[in-house]
Image (cartoon, rainbow, N blue to C red):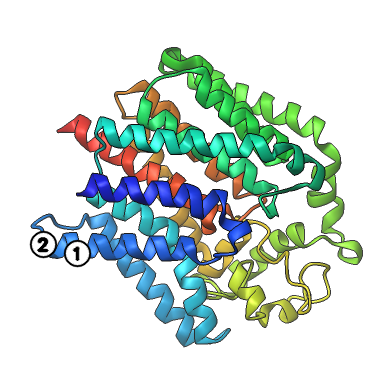
Amino acid sequence: MIGNFYTIFIILFILLGLLFYDCLGIQLIDELLVAILALFTLLVRLNSDKKLSKEMGAFIVISLFYLIYSIILKITSPIAILYDFQQQVKPFVVFYCTSYLNPQFNKRQIKVISITCIITVIITICVIPQTVVSISFMGGHITSLASLTMALFCILYYLNQRRSLLPVSILSLGLFSMRAKFFVTYAFSILLFSLHKRIKLFNIRILVMSGILIFILINYVIWDKFNLYFIQGTEEDSGVARPLFYITSFKILIDYFPFGSGLASFANNASGIFYSPLYYKYDLWQVWGCTPAYPDFVADAFYPNLAQFGIVGVLLFFYFLYKRYNEITRLKNVDRYILGLIVLITILFESVADTMILSNRGVLFFLILGMLRNDLLKDNS
């Protein structure tokens, strides 16, 4: 039953939550599917003797704490807080539900999901010429192309457990997005994919140095954009939203120590829809892309968003990623190990200049992390 549920969930998410997400205009489809997943998990729990893990229990307690804390702090309205709450917990709900349910796929289910991925790729190839011309993908931002190809690559790699040209070819389609972040994750992915069984024999220092070299080379190519966003963009008289948000996030960490300014208060979608008072307090309301009339760039990077959870929230987030990294390095299957590193690298780099993990585009990556955690438990059993 669980395998069938996840097969349907993944297929629906690929088609409705990624491929046709923008052109159909069903903006809440990802929240709806995740809510169904949470409800399904609750039903399984009520009809099962399997207990929740201590980590999952801690996540529930921490989430409720920040919800109550935000309401008491009253930086913004309860509606805004609830709106942001469901977005912030969404990727972690997917991870913990998947970790609890431990879905297993038979050959038929793997085949159905794989065929769905291939059909999605064919549609993607057909629209790439229009994508390049219009600088948009299926009615949405061109970044969606990069996220879709990375998600398809990860799903196919996980299900088939072998290297082939197909997943790499699919991943390469994301290069048409011309996104700097994708170039970085693509280069790392190809490096890890190519090393394969030699990767665990590699000295970690060699891997780190290779990563630094790739990062330097890519930044040389995209220097103009890097300079605009992170050097010139910090000047107050001509500032760009993204770097100014990074600077302001440190001020918020100090001013609202240790638990932050609360949900829906800074650097996320809710803080733009229900315009946050903090943008007036920190003189961001006149910055282009952050004005009350045009707040489209308030959710332009994930890391500044962590300021609303304070230094405690920042530590908790990176501790979560550290635990996932620690689990991935203990996997016996090399392909699983490589895939886990690719997913973590994607999350880390995308979060520098995108809020992917809070959007529809981040759900499947956390689903894969949950399945990889189950693989470790299986290895140790």
Q: Do the numbered discs 1 and 2 sit on residues whose CB atoms are within 8 Å?
A: yes
Query: Does 370 appear above or below 239?
Result: above
Residue at figure coordinates x 32%, y 23% from the top left: 333
Real-space Cα separation, disc 1 to disc 2, in angstroms: 6 Å
Residue 62: % across, % down: 36, 67
Give the camera-side residue of 280 and 154. Answer: 154
* Secondary structure type for disc 1: helix
Name of the residue lying farthest toward the left: 49
Query: Does 46 appear above or below 225?
Result: below
Residue at image mark 1:
43
For residue 82, say whether it is visible. yes
Q: How many marks?
A: 2
**Amino acid on which the number 1 mark rests in the picture:** Leu
Give the left or right position of residue 218, taking residue 167 as reference.
Answer: right
Residue at image mark 2:
47
Residue at figure coordinates x 38%, y 38% from the top left: 113
Residue 134: % across, % down: 80, 47
Give the left or right position of residue 51, taking residue 70 as reference.
Answer: left
The C terminus - image quarter: top left
Query: Does 273 appear above or below 161?
Result: below
Give the camera-side residue of 55 and 346. Answer: 346
- Label 2, residues with CA under 10 Å away: few <14, some 14-19, many ≥20: few
* Secondary structure type for disc 2: loop
Residue 275: % across, % down: 67, 80
**Amino acid on which the number 2 mark rests in the picture:** Asn
Give the left or right position of residue 12, taking residue 274 as reference.
Answer: left
Residue 12: % across, % down: 42, 52
Residue at figure coordinates x 70%, y 47% from the top left: 142
